[in-house]
Image (spheres, rainbow, N blue to C red):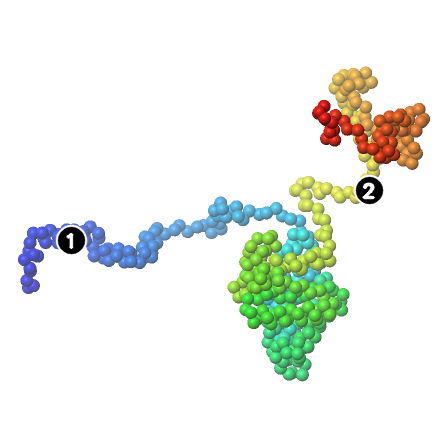
Amino acid sequence: MRPTSPSARSPFARVLRVGAALAVLASGGPAAIAENDADMRYPHLERLRQLRERPAAQPRPSGVARPRPESARRLAAPSPDRPPVEATFFVATLGDSLGLMLADGLRESLATDRPHVGVLRKARDSSGLVREDFFDWRKAAHDIANGAERVDYAVIMLGSNDRQQMRDADGAVLDPLTPRWREVYGARIEAVVGAFRARAIPVIWVGLPIMRQERYAADIAQLNEMFRIHAEKAGARYVDVWERFADDAGHFDAFGPDVNGQNARLRTADGIHLTRAGAVKLAHFVQGDIARAAGAAPAVAAAPEPGRPAPALVDPCEIDATAIVRDTLRQEEEARAAAARFAGIAPPDLPGALFLPSKPAAGAVVPLTVPALSPGGALAAGRATAAGGDAAALMRRALTEGRPQEAKPGRADDFAWPRR
C-alpha cells in the first residue's frame, strides 16, 4: 500500500478531490473531456460531430426541382431576344494559339456592329511555319482557300513557335534566323498568302506583340520584320501591334488601356498570350478593314408580338402624295359632318369659328425666274431715299470727301469739352 502524505490527508485536499470528481461527472466523464479537448485543438472535429448529430434529410420526390434563390433567378433572367442574323460574310483566321485568341476577339468585337460576319477558327495550337511535319500551313492554306466552305477574308497570325531549327527541301537542318533559314521561311510566308491571293481573297497578316523575355522579344521582332516584308510582297496587308501592347517607354507591360480606355490586364502570366481584354483589343486593329469589306449589316425586322401581324415594309418611292392629301381632306369633311350632327344643325349654318378653313393641298404657283411685281404692276423696290438724305450725305462724306463722321453726343468718339 502506497503511503499517503500528511497533506493528502488534510481536509482541504479531500475537498479538492471531491470537487474534481463532481466536475468530471457533470461534464460526462473522462471521454467527454477528451473529446472536448480534441475539439479545441482541431476545430474541424466539432463540425464533423455536428454533421453526425444532424437529423437525416428527407428525400426529395423525384421530378421536383429545387427552387433557386432569388439572386440566382435575377442573374438567370433571359435578356430580350435579338432577331437572328444569318452570316453572309466569312473571315478565316489562321495561326497558332495567338491566332485562336484573335479569332475569339473578332467574334466578340464584330457581334454588335457586324452580326452578319462569321469568323471561322482555322488556327491550330502549337503550330507554325517551321515544323511542317507537325502541321503544314502551306497545304492548309491552299485547302481552306479552295475548299467548299466560303471564305471572303483571311487573317493570319502565327510565328510564336517558330524560333527553332528548320529543314529545307533537301533535308538540311537550318539554324534559326540564319540567312538560309530566312530565305526558306520567307518563301513559306509568301506561299501561305499566295494561296488566298490566287482566289482574290484579301489577306491581313497580324504581327506578334511584344514579349516579356528580352531574348525572345528580340527574335520575335526579327520575325515581325520578315512578316512585313514577305506578306506585303505577296499582296497582304501587314498590321503592326508591337507598340500597342508596350508601355510608354517601349517595354513589356501586362497591363494597359483596353478598347474602352480603361486600364486592364492584357497579357497572361507567361508574358506571351492574351487575356480576354487583350484579345478584344488585338481584334480592334483588324476589324476596321473587315467591317469595310463586309459592309453594313442587313436590316432585319423585329419579330411581331404573338397574335399581331408583322408590319409591312413600304418603299418610300411608292408613296402616292396625291392619295395622302385626298384622304386627309376626306377625314376633315367627315369631322365637319360629325360636329354638325352633334350640334343638331346643318354644316352651312354653323358659325365660322367652329369650322376653320382647311389648308389647301398646294398654294399658288410662284415662278422663280420672273421679277417680283407689286400689286400695281411696278417692280418691287426698297424704300426710296432722297438725294440729299442721310445715307447719301454719309456716303459722300466718307467715300468722296474722305472726312470722318461727325461725333454724336454720348458716343465713344465724342471728345467735346465740356461733356455734353
Tally of marks: 2
In the image: residue 236, left or right of residue 258: right
SS under mark 2: helix
Please state the horizontal and vertical placement of residue 402, each as a whole percent of the image: 84, 35
**Disc 2 target residue:** 318
SS under mark 1: helix
Mark 1 nearby-residue class (10 Å; few <14, some 14–19, many ≥20): few
**Residue at position x 57%, y 53% from top?**
262
**Depth check, front residue: 403 or 135:** 403
Give the amino acid at mark 1.
Answer: Ala
Q: Are marks 2 and 1 in contact (CB under 8 Å)?
A: no
**Depth check, front residue: 189 or 229:** 229
**Residue at position x 70%, y 75% from top?**
187
Residue 107 numbered mark, or none: none
In the image: residue 280, left or right of residue 72: right
**Disc 1 target residue:** 21
